[in-house]
């Protein structure tokens, strides 16, 4: 495990005005080999009748034959009006937690890392990948496809929490990657929320200041409770008196076959 770290802002900028449904892909050259990256969004241009809403819809890492590592991300205007968003690219220090070995193009591998023995999380994890094995013609390209949390029983007392995750080779060549994890301290902890079997529930919080990036983690309460954040995005709203605010929205899904609950932890990086 790494030690919880403060984030460094690698880059910030503005998307420009984008139409509803429009997407834009950008990338950061020379991403550090010992860090993981996260994009925060601060939409602007909302009105009293419509919110400005943006979502990160895709992200991945490339590694070139020169050794250069690049972080790519795609943002999308998911609202109903033309507007834009400030983009905050943050990074936190990370260490290797898993080596994939050779992976074919399109192949998905599933792993898990134990986060604690019992009780709530004190850090919010963020995963990234450090690809290896590029050729002069093709980069090695990997992404973290999804992550979820599961509380299990081990022995008579231990109730460890595991972070499960899938990584995928999304490039054109067989190659490998090291999965990396960074940890950020918890800034806000919300009480456990119950979700029915197979159901999804949404939550939003105020996301000020607008210069921070939000990370969300889940800590299941019951044994064999398995939950996943399936979607997360940012929006700007304007009240009838003209006051604007930034909000962070996420959806939590119960992956199991019985009702369970999970605490929710947010880190501002």
Image (cartoon, rainbow, N blue to C red):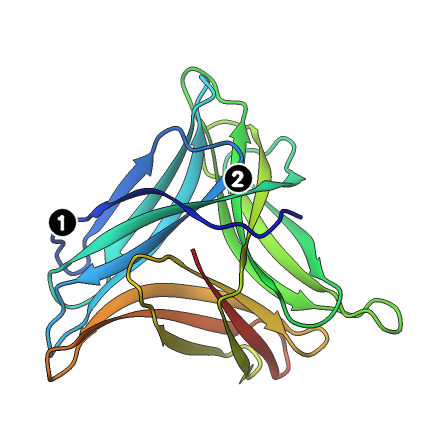
Instruction: Say few, some or many: other residues with alpha carbon within 10 Å of mark 2 (under 14 / 14 to 19 / 20 or more).
Output: many
Quarter of image, res 219:
bottom right
Q: CA distance from mark 2 to mark 1?
A: 29 Å
> Looking at the rendered structure, which numbered label has been put on residue 16?
1
**Mark 1: secondary structure:** loop
> Looking at the rendered structure, which numbered label has been put on residue 199?
none
Expressed as whole percent of the image width and height from the top left, the position of residue 89 reads 34, 46
Question: Taking 156 as reference, is 245 left or right?
Answer: left
Instruction: Say few, some or many: other residues with alpha carbon within 10 Å of mark 1 (under 14 / 14 to 19 / 20 or more).
Output: few
Expressed as whole percent of the image width and height from the top left, the position of residue 141 reads 46, 33
Expressed as whole percent of the image width and height from the top left, the position of residue 76 reads 25, 55
The C terminus: image quadrant: bottom left
Is 58 or 122 nearer to us in this picture?
A: 122
Residue with the mark numbered 2? 129
Expressed as whole percent of the image width and height from the top left, the position of residue 202 reads 41, 77
Quarter of image, res 72:
top left
Is 153 or 170 nearer to us in this picture?
A: 153
């Amino acid at each position: 495990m790494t030690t919880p770290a403060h984030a460094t802002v690698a880059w910030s900028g503005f998307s420009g005005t984008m139409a509803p449904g429009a997407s834009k892909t950008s990338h950061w050259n020379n991403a550090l080999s010992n860090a993981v990256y996260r994009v925060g969004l601060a939409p602007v241009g909302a009105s009293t009748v419509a919110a400005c809403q943006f979502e990160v819809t895709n992200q991945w890492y490339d590694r070139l034959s020169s050794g250069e590592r690049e972080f790519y991300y795609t943002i999308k205007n998911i609202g109903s009006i033309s507007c834009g968003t400030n983009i905050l690219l943050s990074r936190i220090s990370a260490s290797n937690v898993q080596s994939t070995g050779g992976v074919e193009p399109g192949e998905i591998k599933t792993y898990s890392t134990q986060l604690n023995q019992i009780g709530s999380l004190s850090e919010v994890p963020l995963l990234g990948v450090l690809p290896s094995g590029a050729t002069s013609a093709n980069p090695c390209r990997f992404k973290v496809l999804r992550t979820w949390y599961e509380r299990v029983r081990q022995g008579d007392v231990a109730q460890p929490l595991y972070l499960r995750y899938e990584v995928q080779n999304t490039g054109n060549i067989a190659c490998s990657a090291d999965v990396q994890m960074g940890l950020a301290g918890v800034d806000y902890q919300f009480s456990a929320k119950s979700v029915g079997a197979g159901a999804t529930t949404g939550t939003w919080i105020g996301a000020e200041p607008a210069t921070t990036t939000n990370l969300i983690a889940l800590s299941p309460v019951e044994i064999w409770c398995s939950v996943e954040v399936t979607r997360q995005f940012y929006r700007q709203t304007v009240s009838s008196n003209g006051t604007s605010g930034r909000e962070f929205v996420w959806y939590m899904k119960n992956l199991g076959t019985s009702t369970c609950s999970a605490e929710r932890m947010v880190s501002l990086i």
